[in-house]
Amino acid sequence: MRATAIRIIGIDPGLRRTGWGIVESDGVRLTYVASGLLTSNSEEALAYRLRELYEGLCGVLASFKPQEAAIEETFVNKDARSTLKLGQARGMALLAPAQRGLRVAEYAPNLVKKAVTGTGHAEKRQIQAMIGFLLPKASFDSADEADALAIAICHASYRTSPQAVAARAGAGL
């Protein structure tokens, strides 16, 4: 790892599939570190599915030791029950890095798309193509992994913005 580089984990939370992607940024260059997918057993009760995701994420954090985390904000589904379950999965995704003392940022889906592609309404395949361009060594097998890498890239772009610095100062970080 370069001395001035910061290691960032992006997390795309979901109850069935939680994507994660790790990049290093030195302010100019982005380097792909790793990415993957955590899944929960849909046959299990909700509490145990959440535990699976939480423990999996804790394992990723312990293995790769990121210094900051970024998570996609929840959008509201038409189905309130699905939105609630996604919110609970997000809770686990927020808790795991917070317990390790990491700075945790949240980004709206449109801002993530804009940071990666230049437009806030990009299609999934446009995002994946830009990730391939920005991180040529990246290998990802799912849209969830690609989304997580996009979230990490977004954070690398916005982490030093005046709004992000002010938010961290207000949170005591």
Image (cartoon, rainbow, N blue to C red):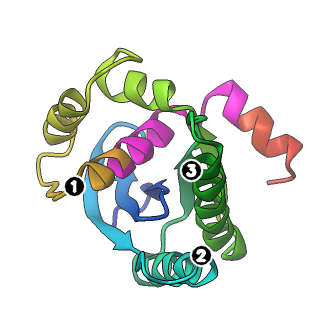
Amino acid at pointer 3? Ser
Quadrant of the snapshot with the N terminus: bottom left
> Which residue, given by chain and number where applicable, does mark 1 sit on?
142
Please name which of the two marks, 1 or 3, marks the residue nearer to the observer. 3
Establish if 172 lies above or below 110.
below
- State the SS at label 1: loop
For marks 2 and 1, give the one nearer the viewer: 2
Query: In the picture provided, is 55 more to the left or to the right than 167?
Result: left
Q: Which residue is mark 2?
A: 46
Q: Quadrant of the C terminus?
A: bottom right
Residue 44: mark: none
Residue 36, how many percent across, how many down?
Answer: 29, 67
Q: Are marks 2 and 1 in contact (CB under 8 Å)?
A: no
Based on the picture, tell me whether residue 4 belongs to the magenta stretch. no
Q: Which residues are magenta?
A: 148-164
- Secondary element at tag 3: helix
| Amino acid at circle 2 | Leu
Q: Please provide percent x and percent y for residue 138.
A: 17, 54
